[in-house]
Image: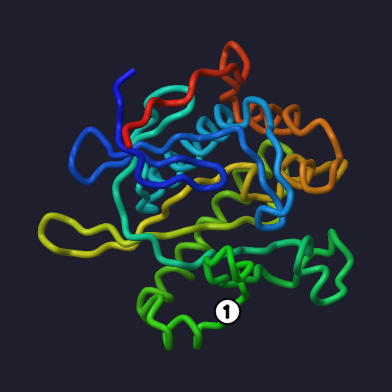
Amino acid sequence: MARRKQIYEGKAKVLFEGPEAGTIVQYFKDDATAFNGGKKGTITGKGVLNNRISEYLFQKLNEIGIPTHFIRRLNMREQLVREVEIIPLEVVVRNTAAGSLSNRFGIPEGTQLPRSIVEYYYKKDELNDPLVSEEHITAFGWATVQELDELLAMALRINDYLSGLFLGIGIRLVDFKLEFGRLTHENGEIQIVLADEISPDNCRLWDLKTNEKMDKDRFRRDLGSVEEAYQEVARRLGILPESGPGDMPGPATMQ
């Protein structure tokens, strides 16, 4: 396997220099974290499944005109993406009360919200990714007013599409996290595109009939059957790898 220069390692992925200028190889790990790294573990085959699930969802979003950083999947654990400047915000879309929203406002988990709610969190692990307002975002220069308008419009459109897609396979999209980046084109034009991933790692997915959790909450809350839940999401999407989640060695790095 060719040796490549590692440029970043996060909690769930490793980024390497891509084969061409302006590209990055995104490697999906089996490592699992929760509570901003307070809980750590391994979910066997998670990287393979998240790679396939995220590939499928990004392709579907590309088809409806949502610009993304995704180019193509390279193998079981890697995909080629465009290099972007990540906007330091987590954009969270909530359709049903769960997690921190339930805790903050005392709303019973599972309560359907009167409308979809979009929240912004500042991406800073050492600060536990604090909830921020549009005033904070524009005042501190994390994004412009125009960029925020784009983020909001794209997040709501993604929510509408994914809610319907998951509904069609018997899954409720409770909430999910998005990240966006600035893609600079050769002519100097800057475009806001969807980046990172969409998978059971950053979505809350519940079975439509039983409300059984099919996402990383199974790891967070020690519910067990974590691998099986990720596999079931992939199975319902029709993309479970033929040989199961499988495994492959991590990529060689060059320091």
Q: Residue at x 35, y 78 (%)?
A: 146
Q: Residue at x 51, y 35 (%)?
A: 28
Residue 74 percent across, percent down from the top left: 37, 26
Q: Which residue is mark 1?
A: 132
Residue 184 percent across, percent down from the top left: 22, 59
Left-right relation of 37 to 209: left
Quarter of the picture containing the N terminus is: top left
Which of the 4 image quadrants contains residue 46?
top right
Residue 88 vs residue 253, the one in the foreground: 253
Kindly state the secondary structure of the residue where label 1 is placed: strand
Mark 1 is on which residue type? Answer: Val
Residue 93 vs residue 21, the one in the foreground: 21
Which of the 4 image quadrants contains residue 104?
bottom right
Q: Is residue 195 above or below residue 122?
A: above
Q: Is residue 223 above or below residue 1?
A: below
Residue 250 percent across, percent down from the top left: 47, 25
Q: Residue at x 86, y 71 (%)?
A: 107
Residue 15 vs residue 186, the one in the foreground: 15
Q: Decide: few, some or many residues near mark 1? Use Cα within 10 Å; few <14, some 14-19, many ≥20.
A: some
Residue 149 percent across, percent down from the top left: 42, 76
Left-right relation of 62 to 35: left
